[in-house]
Image: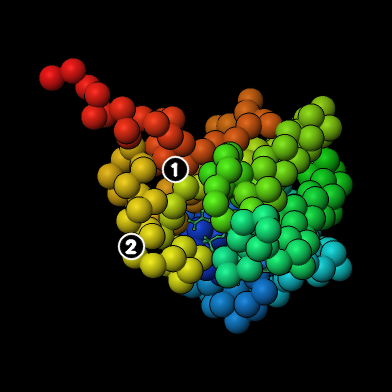
Amino acid sequence: MRLEHKTAVITGGASGIGLAAAHRFAAEGAAVVIGDVNADRAVAAAAEITEAGGTAVGTAVNVMDEESIASLIGRAVDEFGSLHVLCNHVGGSNPRKDLDLLRMDLDEFDKTMALNVRSTVLGARLALPHMIAAGGGSIINTASVAGLSGDYLQSAYGTAKAAVIRLTQYIATQYGPRNVRCNAVAPGAISSPALLDNLSSAEIDAIVAHNALPFLGEPDDIANTMLFLASDESRYLTGQLLTVDGGMSSHSSIAEDRRGFLPA
Ligand SMILES: NC(=O)c1ccc[n+]([C@@H]2O[C@H](COP(=O)([O-])OP(=O)(O)OC[C@H]3O[C@@H](n4cnc5c(N)ncnc54)[C@H](O)[C@@H]3O)[C@@H](O)[C@H]2O)c1
């Protein structure tokens, strides 16, 4: 039981990676509070965990709204007495509006920064006092490989995720002395609804072709990393980015072309 006696809040925990993390955390003994804009799915996910013998509640949250995040954190503390782990997991952008710089919708840029970055700032600000009161905690921010380098599209998303990575270091630096750790996970391509609903299978194949490993990641691949970051096994690890991408970012962009120049 790697998370025994810990309370964890997961935003966006009703689907995909967040849902997988909710199940993994509960299976390891955590009391899990699943917050999601889709309240019905959050409640259903919590019921499933409870049926399996775990402890969970599901509730509505909109991470675009500070009061809504405050009531999510408040619910966790009221119900379970304290807060030790926060996964700031919600993020994304609208791929039809988040294009190259000249064609990017500026309202979409602002919305994307709010959904990915402001929400992470708010989550941390609201959780920190409770974690400090509990003697420490672990904040886990969901970034993306999109935040590591440039691309032809999703300019707002990549910029926002880069900010999440840097913000992680600021939180780690400022609250490490109070025993609060903060790390980020950068998923590569993961078979969650966010990916499967927005990209064609040809586009997914094109992405996976650049992995070092020959397959598409699954939500559990990220959930297991989050579990490690939530648990005391990572007690000496803070301010770091763990990139879980099947090796997509392990090689330079010219590596594939250079294969043609290998000596016989
Ligand atoms: N799937 C991937 O390949 C991939 C890759 C890199 C990063 N990510 C990151 O993972 C996160 C998304 O996780 P996923 O892939 O499992 O997606 P998902 O679509 O399966 O789940 C996202 C959840 O967030 C909820 N949500 C959306 N907006 C919300 C809001 N304003 N407030 C509260 N909840 C909200 C949705 O209802 C949904 O349940 C994002 O931060 C995304 O940038 C995903």
Q: Is residue 6 above or below residue 212?
A: below
Given residues 198 and 238, the one toward you in this image is: 198
Crowding near pointer 1: few (<14 within 10 Å), some, many (20+)?
many
Q: Is residue 26 above or below residue 188?
A: below
**Location of the C terminus (image quadrant):** top left
Q: Residue furthest bottom?
A: 40
Q: CA distance from mark 1 to mark 2?
A: 18 Å
* Residue located at (51% from left, 47% from top): 187
Given residues 246 and 21, the one toward you in this image is: 246
Mark number for residue 233? none
Relative image position of residue 79 (x, y in whole percent): 74, 65
Mark number for residue 245? 1
- Among numbered discs 1 and 2, the one appearing first in the sequence: 2
Left or right, 215 with respect to 58, comes to left
* Residue located at (67% from left, 62% from top): 104
Q: Is residue 3 above or below residue 62?
A: above
Visible residue check, residue 43? no
Crowding near pointer 2: few (<14 within 10 Å), some, many (20+)?
few
Relative image position of residue 112 (x, y in whole percent): 71, 61
Relative image position of residue 87 (x, y in whole percent): 65, 52
The residue that label 2 is drawn on is 202
Q: In what quadrant does ligand 1 lie?
A: bottom right
Identify which amino acid the numbered label 1 is placed on.
Asp
At mark 2, the secondary structure is helix
Label 1 CB-ligand 1 distance < 8 A? no
* Residue located at (64% from left, 53% from top): 155
Identify which amino acid the numbered label 2 is placed on.
Ala
